[in-house]
Structures are given as C-alpha cells and as structure tokens.
Amino acid sequence: MALIDRLYEVNRRIPKRQYYPLFVNGTKVGQVDVQLLDALKPPLFCIDNAFKTVNMSFASESCHQFEDELADFFVDFFAHRGLSGWRDERYAVKACHGSPTLFLLERAALSYLGITGYGVHVNGYVKKSDGIHMWVAKRASNKPTSPGKYDQIAAGGQPHDLSVWENMIKECQEEASIPEWLAKTAVPASAISYRYDLPIGLRPDVIFNYDLCLPADFVPTVNDDEVESFMCVPIHDLLDWVAGTQDFKFNSAVVIIDFAIRHGLIGPEHSDYLRLQQGMYQPL
C-alpha cells in the first residue's frame, strides 16, 4: 500500500453508476443514485425521466413543514431498509459553500441525495528538536462511523448554526480539552474535496483544515464519548503508518497527507506528488 491508495479510497467510483441531478426550487443541490428512484415518491419528489432529473419544491413560508416531511420520509426509509447511523442532526443544504441555506436535512441522509457535506479537521502538531510530531485521536469503538479508527486531534461535521471557525473551537474543546484561547491560535490552512460512490448513494465532501501548533508540554485529554485516547507521533512515522495501513478514518488520512504536502514533507520528488495533489481537490 502507498499514500496514493488513501486518495483512491475517498474518490472511488462504481463503473456504470448513474445519477439524476437533484434540484430544489430550481437550484441544483445533489445527485440521486438511479437505484433509489423507485423509493422517491410524490408529493415530495418529482422524477422527470425525460430530462433525467429529480425535483423538489416548497414555498418559503412552508420550509419547516418541508423539512419535517423530508425527515419523516427518511425515518421510514432507514427503518424499511434496516439502515443504521441516524444522527438526529440537521445540516444545512446549499448550492455551494457561501450560498444561502435552502433547507435543513438529517446528516445521515445527505449521501442518499448526493448532497455535499462539510466538516472541519484540526491538525494538532508540535515542533520538536527532531522535527514535527502530530497528535492523533483514536475514535471511540461505539462511533457510528469508522469506530476505533485514528483521526485528527479534533474533527467534526459542520452544524448549520455555527460558523466554521466557531465549530473548530467547539470541536477542540469537546474532543481534546483544548482551551478556547489556544484553539483560537489555529490557522485556516486548506480545504480538501472528494466524492465517492457508496453501495447506494454518493458522498461528496468538503473538509476545512486548520493547523494548530501546540506547546510541547500540552497533552490533550478526552472530554467526550467520541474519543478513546490520544497519541503523539513523529510525522514521518505517521506518514509511513498512513501509507501502510487502513488504521485511519478514510478522510483523516487524506488530511494528514495534505498537511505533509503543505509543510514541505512531501515534494515533487515523490512519484505520486501530482496525483496526491489532484486527488485532494476533486470537483463536486
């Protein structure tokens, strides 16, 4: 295995997979796997097979009713298919980052409509005499996604009622007991994007990455039930670990690769340099 394999994992494609664009009030917000079309019924969904689109609409004054009806649909959808992972968290659906929120949707349902999800990851690193070391977190074994895998020191999905900056600070405090004053020294560093086909559905994601240089004597401590433990690893050992195993959450591995490239630890001499770069910035 190699670092490039981590990029293949987040950008995997299923041959001959087809999608219908999803429009809400005339704005494209997602892509629906054609395998799901039979489950999408009026009045919520209108399928136009001539133009190969899925359309939804609601009046602005009935947005909350629309959100509730959509939530009820997916509660039944999950129950009938025996699906797990319901979060009971509503995320903002937008045409793109920075555009107005159109409506809110249960986080676990995003991939079934091919709607872009957003998150924030924090690279907590330490500068030592022998180079950069990075703190990584081991995810709790009862997490609904990637249980027991390794992750950034703090990371999470993007709630609809917080800015990315506010969310970064919140995740630092909740997951690693990083005080607010220290979290606020984090630097917005990059945004990576990827999309991959699920057995049913599509997951397009954007991750906003922050670099947080931590004091040498700082030790993160578990502060919620999402993390089991932390460890600090020399960055070159960490890259070998990421390249040689699947111990890391699929997108967290890519965040580490992005950090290494930005900090000059992986350069053009690396045989996969361009493919690594391209794989982290996929059009959605």
Image: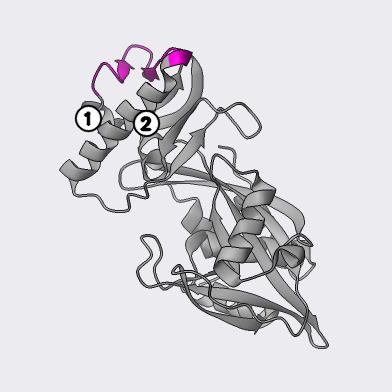
Q: CA distance from mark 1 to mark 2?
A: 11 Å
Mark 1 or 2: the one toward you? 1
Is residue 214 visible to us here? Answer: yes
Q: Which residue is pictured at 38% across the width and 34% down the height?
A: 113
Q: As displayed, is residue 9 above or below residue 75?
A: below
Name the image quarter holding residue 61: top left
| Residue appearing at x 26%, y 26% in the figure | 40
Mark 1 surroundings within 10 Å by alpha-carbon count, few (fewer than 14), some (14 through 19), many (20 or more): few
Give the camera-side residue of 12 and 262. 262
Segment tinted magenta in the rendering: 41-61
Q: Is residue 129 above or below residue 255?
A: below
Quadrant of the snapshot with the C terminus: top right
Q: Earlier in the sequence, mark 1 or mark 2?
A: 2
Question: Mark 1 and 2 residues: CB-CB less than 8 Å, in contact?
Answer: no
Query: Is residue 278 visible in this depiction of the protein?
Result: no
Q: Amino acid at mark 2?
A: Val
Q: Which x, y percent locates residue 245?
A: 48, 75
249 to 35, vertically: above or below: below
| 266 within the magenta span | no
Left or right of 37? Residue 162 is right
Q: Residue at x 72, y 73 (%)?
A: 125
Q: Which numbered tag is attached to residue 217?
A: none
Q: Amino acid at mark 1?
A: Ala
Q: Residue furthest left?
A: 80
Q: Secondary structure at mark 2?
A: strand
Q: Residues within 10 Å of mark 2 (few under 14, many from 20)?
A: many
The x and y percentages for residue 273 are 69, 61
Residue matched to label 1 = 39
Q: Position of residue 1 (x, y in %)?
A: 50, 72
Q: Dot 1: what SS? A: helix
